[in-house]
Image (tube, helix red, strand yellow):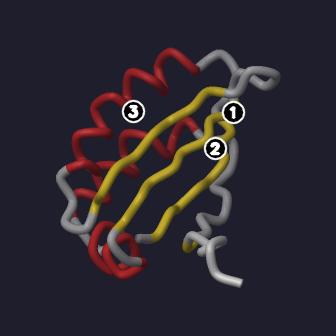
């Protein structure tokens, strides 16, 4: 499993609109092949910052699958206007800490 984690900065004052749009967009990403789970957390100290974490079966499911789909265009239309800037979206693999 691969985890995508990204901090997204929303234009201040548009947080409620963003959260409403994300509720719609949430259904889009949830139906993607290779999607495992996703969460959205709002910043405590910086309330216009959000942490999006998405778990995918593979990097390809995210990059070639979702980003290459028509659904991604709808995702972008719904959410990207809220972002101050588009940050990089890195992928992470869990480290097996039981191995020496």
Which residue does the image show at 70% across and 27% down from the upper left?
Answer: 43
Q: Toward which corner of the image does residue 69 lie, by quadrant?
A: bottom left
Write the residue at 40% across / 46% down.
Answer: 38
Asked whether, in this view, residue 39 is left or right of residue 56, the answer is: right
How many angstroms separate mark 1 from mark 3 (CA)? 14 Å
Return the residue found at the far right: 45
Q: State the image coordinates of residue 25 (x, y, percent, origin top left).
A: 31, 39
Number of the label disc, if any, that sits on residue 8: 2
66 relative to 14, above or below: below
Q: Which residue is mark 3?
A: 22
Q: Residues within 10 Å of mark 3 (few under 14, many from 20)?
A: some
Left or right, residue 48 beside residue 33: right
**Which residue lies under the disc numbered 1?**
49
Q: In the image, which disc is placed on residue 24?
A: none
- Percent from the top left, x then y, of residue 21? 37, 29
Q: Are discs 2 and 1 less than 8 Å apart at CB? A: yes
Q: Which of 55/50 is in front? A: 55
Q: Secondary structure at mark 3?
A: helix
């Amino acid at each position: 499993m691969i985890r995508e984690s990204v901090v997204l900065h929303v234009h201040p004052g548009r947080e409620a609109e963003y959260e409403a749009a994300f509720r719609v967009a949430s259904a889009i990403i949830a139906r993607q092949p290779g999607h495992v789970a996703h969460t959205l957390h709002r910043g405590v100290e910086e309330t216009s910052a959000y942490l999006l974490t998405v778990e995918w079966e593979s990097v390809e499911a995210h990059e070639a699958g979702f980003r290459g789909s028509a659904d991604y265009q709808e995702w972008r239309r719904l959410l990207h206007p809220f972002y101050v800037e588009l940050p990089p979206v890195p992928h992470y693999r869990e480290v097996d800490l039981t191995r020496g």
